[in-house]
Amino acid sequence: MSFTYDSDTKERVRAATDIVDLIGSRLELRRQGRNYVALCPWHADSRPSLQINSERQTWKCWVCDIGGDVFSYLMQDEGLSFPEALKVLAERAGIALAAKRGSRRPPDAPDVKAEMFRALAWADDLFHQYLLESSEGEAARQYLEGRGITAESIKSFGIGLAPDSWSTLVDTGAAQKLSPHVLESAGMVIRRDRGGYYDRFRNRLMFPIRDREKRTIAFGGRILPGAEEGAKYINSPETRLFQKSQQLYGFDLAHSSVRRAKQALVMEGYTDVIVAHQCGVENSVAVLGTALGQPHLKLLRHYCDSVVLLLDGDEAGQKRSDDVLELFLHAQIDVRVLTLPDGMDPADFLLQHGRDELHELIQSAADALEFKMRRVSRGFDPLVDTHRANQAVEEMLTLLAKVPHSGLISNDAFRLRQNQVLPRLARKFSIPEDVLRQRLTALRNRQSRYQRRPEADENNAKRLLRPGDLSPYERELLELIIVAPQVAPMALERVQSGWLECDAARQMLDAYQQLEFGGQSLEFESVLVALEDSSLKSLLVTLHEQANAKLRYTSVSPDERLRVLTHRMGERQDQLRRQRQESDLQNSQISDQEELAVLQDVIRQARLRQGLVDQPAAQDTPQTTSPADDVRHTEQSSPD
């Protein structure tokens, strides 16, 4: 096992991040003694199952059987890798991670990302105050009022106005010690071909785009009514902080509601989201000038079970639905499509009809396959216009064929919907269902270049580790060194790597080995920080809890427990070696000379067991009832 970052770096970030603050910013916590509990966001929790230990800085849900530290919480909550979680928490704590080897940035150079965040926060405030206080902002204020956007929403979403000037940010940024280079890196100014810079946004309503930590990372700018220049909407360019295909507008305010509702409403406009939140539909977000994509669904999948795409009721909105239908086939989430009546957008519909009527429409929203079938069969009589009917059936089957029936991508819900759609398709177009299935099979067979999605491989390869995956000896060994780290160096000397059957046990022991070689602490907290795999972190926390529960039932010293355990592990290996030797003898898989050597070894081991030869001094006979047995008898006392 090799670690991405050194332990000192990880420990600095961990020490600067209080787990109660981190989880409390996402969930409602309740104090329970010295610790806290919360409703677990990863299962249907009716009583608080998520336990947060403020002293050890760990969390655990016994129902889901997962746990860990601040890093693994973020990894579980947002689907991040360890390096990604480390960077997020480092930025949250204001800690600059060391530049990677080969980087040209000198050690004392300013953190460019931190400066970009500062520049964007400053611009956010400047635009907001300009909208609220300047006489030039009157027209913009009237426009917002006419759209039904309240003063409270203007404040909570940070809506602003960019001055009608080519150099406001360039001129005033110097007083904030913000260089034009930083402003350009943040996407706020553009470099002139002949030298110098000018402001990217001028005389536009400004909608800050914020990340999960509520930091401004970009802007969307809308031209004011009556202005004749430029596109209606422009967004910041992609930067080190902003990738539009991975962000959703309003998610910083909506994520808690999305999690509670188990559903996200995805809209197309900033004002749609703002009005939705005003009307109490707080699980609403919007895409950022791009179609809903796989990264969006990957993000939302960690918060909800269902996504409803709300499309404008005009023809353009209808056509955009086709762009995302194929995406839905591979989504590990229930995705539905809703088009609003009378060509209305969500903001107009909510202001005219209210939240309750929108919720009624959402309840009747069709899933992707049903939505597609309605579209292909609309506007003609399939019994009269056979040509269009054949085209519609072929289009529908071609869409279905893009997910193989063999289920390389595990999507039982999709296959269930498919089996519901095919009979309806047969009835709609008066075609026998078995004919449709034969055609579907033929189309699938033509998908010869279909490749398994890397994301599916990654998801299927990930399996939660549990103590039951370990052998009794491995579990006893790890529990022992977790609660008695002073015996860990001796355990590392005595336990041979070949004695361990489970890869997780080997990786855990390897982590202890690396810390020991580095002269670092082997305490539980240090090992937890050192581990980078979220599943290993979860296993470590579970073993720690179980080991502490068992301590009440044994008075045997850790040294004695280790002596007996390693003796029994050695005996176990001898037994396995004898079984392999006997198997080789029976199967005649060795030469005559080797067979003689094996027989002599078997006889020697048998004489040792019968006491006909003195036992080696290093192998003391254990007491009748071992500490390992003591501990195993009490396993039922640990939390389920």
Image: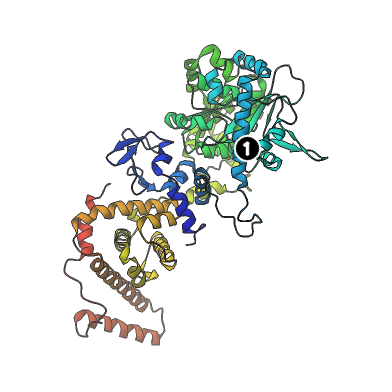
Residue at 55% over, 14% down: 351
| SS at badge 1 | helix
Q: Nearer the viewer, residue 296 or 418?
A: 296
Residue 294 in the image, given as x and y percentages of width and height: 58, 39
Residue 634 in the image, given as x and y percentages of width and height: 21, 55
Up-down: is 584 above or below 506? below
Up-down: is 399 above or below 445? above
Residue under pointer 1:
119
Q: Residues within 10 Å of mark 1 (few under 14, many from 20)?
A: many
Q: How many marks?
A: 1
Amino acid type of the residue tagged 1 in the rendering: Ala
Up-down: is 410 above or below 272? below
Residue 55 relative to residue 11: left or right: left
Residue 438 can be seen, yes or no: no
Residue 476 relative to residue 464: left or right: left
Of all residues shown, which one is farthest toward the front? 175
What color scheme is it?
rainbow
Of all residues shown, which one is farthest toward the right? 194
Residue 398 relative to residue 263: left or right: right
Q: Nearer the viewer, residue 352 or 55?
A: 55
Residue 332 relative to residue 119: left or right: left
Residue at 49% over, 62% down: 2
Residue 156 can be seen, yes or no: yes
Residue 118 in the image, given as x and y percentages of width and height: 60, 39
Residue 600 in the image, given as x and y percentages of width and height: 31, 86
